[in-house]
Image (cartoon, rainbow, N blue to C red):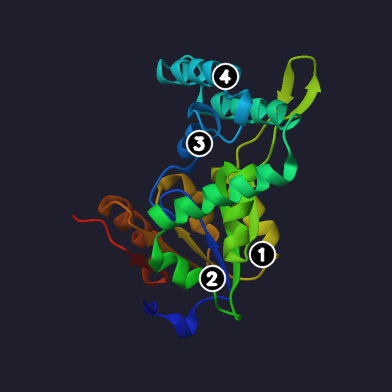
Amino acid sequence: MESEFDSNETQIRVVDLDGTLVRCNTFHHWIKRCFLMPNAIVGVHWLYVAPLAFALTALRLLGCVSHRIWKMCFLLLWEYVSIWKDREKTEVRLRMFVQDILERYGNGLVIDEVCGRDSIESVLATAAPGVYAKYFAEHLSAVCLATGNPTRIAAFRWEFEENVSEAKASRVLSYANGKPFTFYTDHPDDWPAIKIAERVVLVAAEPGFVSEVRGVKGASCRVLDACPS
């Protein structure tokens, strides 16, 4: 499906992952596939990792930990398990995970617009962890700007920043280096990036959010795969 203003579209296209490139929450699927299922990617370590994963998820559901801390804990758990795993086999299984998500939940309209064109420079900008987001970017032949792993700065202290909101906008702006870009997203968390984008494509976004963005961006905003009113 061609866009309404392809002739004026920018050469850099920045796309969000969850809800935009794919119609699901990839982090939730990654947790299930890696830690909670008997055939989990963590393999034989599932027997002692799964109880920890269930406990972390229960704490999150009860509101005892923030989403940021929850994500950081799972990334620390992944790093610990990865020490004992075969790196090549892990990469194969993560690629299979990504392929499965794209086949089941991939938004073909968005995928067609951001990859497979020699004249387009694609960038995946997401709050999802880079440990698997990089394979989504690989599939798109895109640059990956994702949430990194926690960095230990002292005993029981880690530095961790999600690639969301202002942080995401800052990284996209730095990558674009003054060049105009088109930004694909579905949710209000991306307002900082929306404001600095040359053009905005809202994917399956709520009508109220669409109206707000059009009030700011005007004709530079279009809707793809619209949500029912």
Q: Which mark is residue 115?
A: 2
Q: Which mark is residue 176?
A: 1
N-terminal-most mark, 1 or 4: 4
N-terminal-most mark, 3 or 1: 3
- Residue found at the very far bottom of the displayed protein: 7
Q: Is residue 72 visible?
A: no
Q: Which residue is mark 3?
A: 33
Considering the numbered disc 1 on the image, is that residue within a helix, a strand or a loop? helix
Between 41 and 173, which is closer to the camera in this rendering?
41
N-terminal-most mark, 1 or 2: 2
Question: Label 4 amino acid?
Answer: Leu
Q: Is residue 143 visible?
A: yes
Question: Label 1 amino acid?
Answer: Ala
Q: Quadrant of the N terminus?
A: bottom left
Rounded to the nearest angstrom, the CA distance separating label 3 from label 4 is: 14 Å
Rounded to the nearest angstrom, the CA distance separating label 1 from label 4 is: 45 Å
Question: Label 2 amino acid?
Answer: Cys
Considering the numbered disc 4 on the image, is that residue within a helix, a strand or a loop? helix
Label 4 vs label 2, nearer the camera: 4
Between 29 and 155, which is closer to the camera in this rendering?
29
N-terminal-most mark, 3 or 2: 3
Label 3 vs label 1, nearer the camera: 3
Q: Which residue is mark 4?
A: 47
- Check disc 1: other Cα within 10 Å, few if <14, some if 14-19, many if 20+: some
